[in-house]
Amino acid sequence: MNNRPLPIMRIYSRPAIGILFSLWAYLCTLGMAAVAPRYLPARGLRHLIVLSVSLLTLLLVVGITYFVYRDCDEYVQRRILKSAALTGVILAFSTLGYFCLEQLGAPRLSMIAVNLYGCAVFSVLLLWVLYRAR
Amino acid sequence: MKNILPELRAQRGWTQGELAVRLSVSRQTVNAVETGRYEPSLSLAFTMAALFDLPIENIFLGRRRPRAFTAPEPGAESP
């Protein structure tokens, strides 16, 4: 019996780091977008920078998720798809619940909050799947 | 679908992790197949069959049988 390390460990630990990095970059750019109005008064330039940086990092998240999906085996791929479906269900119920809260007087939220919430839920589910598949 | 993967693995003294390495899948996948939570794809089933040098039907014991098909009489109306 040889003692070589299991290749699966190598396959799934790097994407997990990639997901965390991309999520961190995405949160940073969203934070930058939030504080940008204070430092960039020019309307057109500000919107261009905020939108392009946010969209690029969102593309980074989507790209890393795609490469993780492609490199995983069939069962883990199915779990990732189930995570995406579960994220959709959680988002649907959460937004419906918050809509009811809004009717009761809760403050209105920006759509970016839904984006952030969905991204965070999916990343947590994805990391859980990869952790279980190690 | 039932299977005899645990028995075959035990005969060879392999752990789930070792079998997973030989099949190039995760240990979680082997566990899910063994416990019947996941039915593997045809290509993975063929890989397992080749690894254990057995036909697929000797490893996976299917419960479902195909429905008997009777050809319609010539000239009979289809439902």
Image (tube, rainbow, N blue to C red):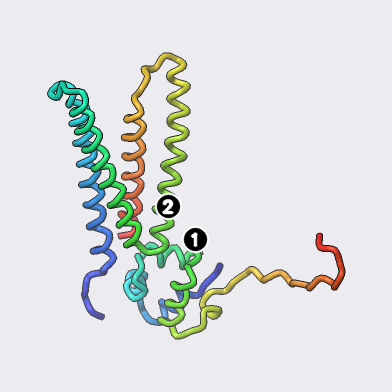
Q: Is residue A80 above or below residue A30?
A: below
The answer for which chain carries disc 1 is B
In the rendered structure, which amino acid carries the disc numbered 2? Leu
Q: CA distance from mark 2 to mark 1?
A: 16 Å
Residue A52 coordinates in the image, percent (x, y) = 23, 37
Name the residue that disc number 2 marks.
A81
| Discs 2 and 1 share one subunit | no
Which element is circle 2 on?
Answer: helix
Q: Which residue is mark 1?
A: B37
Label 1 packing within 10 angstroms: few (<14), some (14-19), many (20+): few
The chain letter for the residue carrying disc 2 is A
Q: Residue furthest front?
A: A44
Which residue is at the front of the view, B6 or A20? A20
Q: Amino acid at mark 1?
A: Arg
Q: Residues within 10 Å of mark 2 (few under 14, many from 20)?
A: some
Residue under the point 31% across and 45% down: A123
- Residue furthest to the left: A39
The quarter of the picture where residue B52 lies is bottom left
Q: Position of residue A1 (x, y in %)?
A: 26, 80
For residue A14, the mark is none
